Image: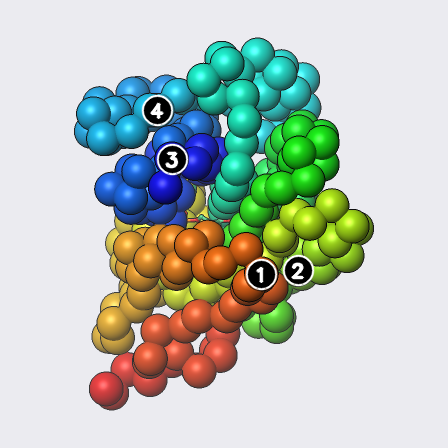
Amino acid sequence: MGKTAFITGATSGIGKATAILFAQNDINLILCGRREERLQELKTQIGKQVKVHTLNFDVRDKNAVFDAIALLPDAFSKIDILINNAGNAHGLDPIEEGSLEDWDAMLDINVKGLLYVSKAILPQMIERKEGHIINIGSTAGKEVYPKGNVYCASKHAVDAINQGMRIDLNQYGIRVGAVNPGLVETEFSKVRFKGDDARAATVYKGFQPLVAEDIADIIYFVVTRPYHVNIADLVVMSTAQASSTIVNKNL
Ligand code: NDP
Ligand code: 8X3
């Protein structure tokens, strides 16, 4: 394919699986995340297949985001595909007990971080009148579940931003779409429950959840459609899941 993809949140889960699949399919990569060691490990793993450049920044730090993207080496300066994936839930509390730090983290990372990265990359896509942006939303952006409050709000914002981007960038021929997964077993719940791995494991117990590779397959499908096809909004759940609160543990 010979294109270049910029993936945020490539150190784990969906972003990492997408990077590995893209590398197998000849898509050069700019991989982002805060955990530098993991970025280097992944670069070592896939760097023989395609060109890989790593960027180590927190998406909340707008100067770091804009500086890193402005200083990309020539070989990586043309970005064809942007996967806005970095994000997490922080906490699972009723609204009256929610932590301000958790709320800030979710809104700053999942919403504002996605905007900063997009804003830094959009000018080159607009200038070339080409580009493909995939925003990773969630079923939490399509409905609200108990104690999901602010995480759901952040993903509803991603849903709105996805629609807004598609409308505003239509005139430039830039494709914009969202992939909205249900329950995927990654490090997501370990982060949500702040390292309580036992509690995190209970989220995926008793049914077969999606895995990161399932979402990577879908993202790869989305980015390999012919130019006239834009998958605007896609929801995917495990067969056992019907909604955020209905999961069949008897399959
Ligand atoms: P993981 O926890 O496995 O991965 C999250 C990724 O986001 C990591 O690479 C992490 O990198 C990065 N990240 C988190 N915070 C920041 C930050 N402040 N700055 C830069 N990078 C950051 O979870 P998933 O792979 O499951 O999550 C990926 C996306 O998928 C998220 O947007 C999530 O909301 C969404 N999603 C997940 C679902 C699930 O059930 N797992 C379902 C629906 C959507 P690092 O810590 O190194 O910075
Ligand atoms: C992740 C899925 O249901 O844990 O976005 O919110 S859920």
Q: Name the quadrant where ligand 1 sits.
A: top left
Residue 52: numbered disc = 4
Q: Earlier in the sequence, mark 3 or mark 4?
A: 3
- Residue at horizontal 61%, vertical 72%? 143
Q: Position of residue 94 (x, y in %)?
A: 61, 62
Q: Position of residue 234 (x, y in %)?
A: 52, 68
Q: Residues within 10 Å of mark 3 (few under 14, many from 20)?
A: few
Asked if the residues shown at circle 3 and circle 1 are in contact, with their CB atoms under 8 angstroms apart, the answer is: no
Q: Circle 1 is placed at which residue position?
A: 228
Q: Earlier in the sequence, mark 2 or mark 4?
A: 4
**Disc number at residue 2?**
3
Residue 57 image point, x, y percent: 51, 22
Tell me the CA gap for discs 3 and 1.
Answer: 19 Å
Along the line of sight, the residue nearer the viewer: 133 or 182: 133
Query: Residue type at mark 4?
Result: Val
Residue 12 occupies quadrant: top left
Distance, label 4 to label 1, CA atoms, is 28 Å
Disc 3 to disc 2, C-alpha distance: 30 Å
Mark 3 and mark 4: Cα distance apart in space? 12 Å
Under 8 Å from ligand 1: the CB of mark 1? no
Query: Which residue shows up at 68% across the image and 40% down it?
Result: 129
Please identify, in this view, whether the residue under mark 4 or under mark 1 is nearer the observer. Answer: 1
